[in-house]
Image: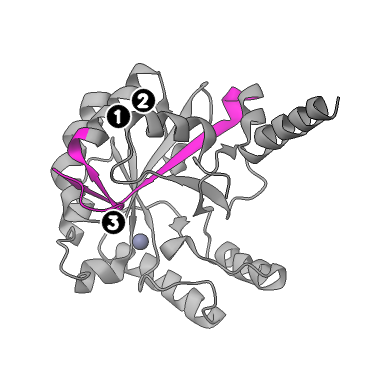
Amino acid sequence: MILYLILVVLAIFIVVYFRLYLFVFPHNRLVILMYHQIEKESHEDLTVSLKNLEQQFSYLKRNKYTSHFFSDLTVSTKRNIIITFDDGYRNNLEYLPSLLEKYNLKATIFIPTGFIEKGYKNYAMMSFDEIRNLDKKYFEIALHSHAHENLRNAPFDFVEKDLKKNMQILDAQNIRYSKVLAYPYGKYPQKKHDKLAFFSILKKIGIDFAVRIGNKVNYYPTQHPYELCRIDIKGKDSLIKFKFKLIFGRLKLF
Ligand SMILES: [Zn+2]
């Protein structure tokens, strides 16, 4: 009897923790994937190998996932997905256009304008011209702050100035973008009072959605537009891991 009870409690915990109850509402289940770099071979977590990425895209297509932009987000199908890439690495440009076309998918690229202006470490980044010329059928541009600072404890006047600068530079470059923010490093204030004040800045400057990491699947339409979760697809994730992540969001309990 006790064993039975433990199993029931465990099953309920798993259903709630991994948000498996969302399968009851497949039309409202929204998976958002997070990627960074693409290379022929993966050397680290933030770089997906071309082979893995192609396998993953092919899997999404075969399983009838519908990929959306944030700008036209109506979860109208049974399998809704948003594919995102952070930072504007130039290798995205080399591989993504043909892959997205081949598998009929879309991608959102989050641009930190400071990285485009000044570069980032030794990485090759896209130029403003390249960003502007991305095919709008397959690419959506969105915000990733200007300076790419951790915003968890940043002063609010800095936050507002930096996010506005991100938009102003894209405007000046004549680049169309969606008012969707990916928090740099996925970080934003956690204390309730700070969080609300921070969100009121986002609202004031016209941000529609913001994404964290969190590794959870979302219910959409959401009550928490500034806390949408993304699933971190690691460089060397096997196809099996990828499939599990599409179901559970994460592979570990904590
Ligand atoms: Zn970033």
Query: Mark 1 and mark 2: span between their CA atoms?
Result: 5 Å
Q: Does the closest atom of ligand 1 sit within 8 Å of the Cβ of label 3? A: no
Q: Secondary structure at mark 1?
A: helix
Residue 165 shown left or right of residue 75 in the figure: left
Query: Mark 2 and mark 3: span between their CA atoms?
Result: 29 Å
Residue 98 shown left or right of residue 28 in the figure: left
Identify the residue position indicated by label 1 in the image: 57
Residue at 33%, 39% in the rendered image: 237
Residue at 15%, 68% in the rendered image: 122
Residue at 22%, 29% in the rendered image: 101
Q: Nearer the viewer, residue 162 or 96?
A: 96
Seen in the picture, residue 73 relative to 186 is either above or below; the reply is above
Seen in the picture, residue 62 relative to 144 is either above or below; the reply is above
Identify the residue position indicated by label 3 in the image: 175
Residue 98 lies in the magenta-colored region: no
Residue 60 circle label: 2
Camera-side mark, 1 or 3: 1
Q: Are marks 1 and 2 in contact (CB under 8 Å)?
A: yes
